[in-house]
Amino acid sequence: MAEEVLLLGAWASPFTSRVELALKLKGVQYKYSDEDLNNKSPSLLQYNPIYKKVPVLVHNGKPIVESQVILEYIDETWQGYPLLPKDLYERAIARFWVKFIDDKCWPALQKVFIGEEKGREKAVEEAYEVLKFLEKELKEKRFFGGESIGMVDIAANIIGYWLGACEEATGVELLTREKFPKLSNWIDEFVSNSVIKENLPPRDKLVPFLRHRFGL
Amino acid sequence: MGEVKLIATTQSLFCTRVEWALKLKGVEYEYIEEDLRNKSPLLLEYNPVHKKVPVLVHHGKPIAESLPILEYIDETWKENPLLAEDPYQRTKARFWAQFVGDKCVFGAFEAACLAEGEEKMKAIESAQESLAFLEKQIEGKKYFGGEEIGFLDLAAGWIPHWLNVMEEAGGMKLLDAEKFPSLHEWAQNFIQIPLIRECIPPRDKLLEYFNASISYMRSLATS
């Protein structure tokens, strides 16, 4: 049976970008369908009735939702480039950090950039606390995955690219090289990686989009 | 297979699901009870990020967060697999485990113990919407894992006991047997399994805990 891979996504969404990155790293051919999140398609509502969100990966007609779940599926279904390490303990640690990024980093960043100005100082302090853990976890590694990009790096795309775009859109400075030297280096590596940089939404499109989104 | 320790508390549903997995696989482990009001140096060293239980320690290496721990246990000890072989089935189990094992827990806790008045009504409605999704998943099956319990049964395993006690503490019903007959039946079957039953905390202590949470939240509201 000819393989059919469809990705329902939104061009500005870091979660969609994660899935595209994983598919590209694995060399999987796929069709991309951009969703207008203000006018969700019947397909999206059918494939993701619980959350009604992107991304949705549809493989041979079967939908998979939630980006971390999709990443695991991609890693298990297509061989080639490994997203998770082979070592069982390292895999558990990678899963821990992916969860940390989604459960703690994402909300913390949202509070900084989307939250009210009067709460900003506190939000920035809280975001620092969260980012410090990631700074520490990098240790002397080039990527969270070691010498090459892994699942944690992919999940950390919100820090790798979207954070910088949000800073530019809002004028709020969060991740400085002074405070976070390792993360700053990691961001440089992340955005200059050949597969990644081809698949990020253009900055000059993303920044105005975010400004508009933040009501600025 | 090496030394296994579990740092946990008896009341925590996140900890019990790890115990269930270890027992299902026949893994010998040392249980270390943690006092969360007075966290041990061990916990702070092994889980510096969240400072929470459960933490599984294998060959001296710690793993935190109950769902990653369950995945680790399943990959390390091959007896009684928790996840299916097929990637799509595994994916479905993972998705639902996150939904019921994480999101629904807080939804239920909010409906039972935190919210009041109109907020409570909304929280109950939301929690029941979640249960409706779950009902569809279990329809026609004995367990979420099929004939045997699996990953999703363990993730949802808080429902037969912890949810039941939350309902009593909060004076409301979420798992309505009429609205959710299949889920209700699954809950009865699940809790009867001996190795499941032997790990659950005593009902009176758990009720005390939830009642204390309610009193605490009320005191915050009025202070």
Image (cartoon, helix red, strand yellow):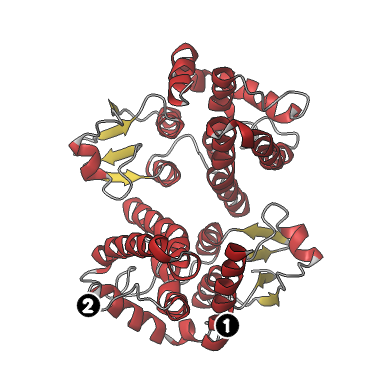
Residue B36 x/y as whole percent: 70, 69
Left or right: residue A156 versus residue B128 is: right
User: What is the secondary structure assignment of the residue under circle 2?
Assistant: loop
The one of B33 and A88 positioned closer to us in this rendering: B33
What residue is at 25 percent from the left and 38 percent from the top?
A44
Q: In which quarter of the image is residue B43?
A: bottom right
Q: In which quarter of the image is residue A191?
A: top right
Q: Indicate the amino acid at tag 2.
A: Glu
Q: Is residue B182 visible?
A: yes
What residue is at 49 percent from the left and 76 percent from the top?
B24
Q: Can residue B151 be seen in this view?
A: no
The one of B223 and B99 positioned closer to us in this rendering: B223
For residue B208, which numbered disc appears in the image?
A: 1
Q: Mark 2 points at which residue?
A: B178
Q: Distance between the residues labelled 2 and 1?
A: 28 Å
Q: Indicate the amino acid at tag 1.
A: Glu
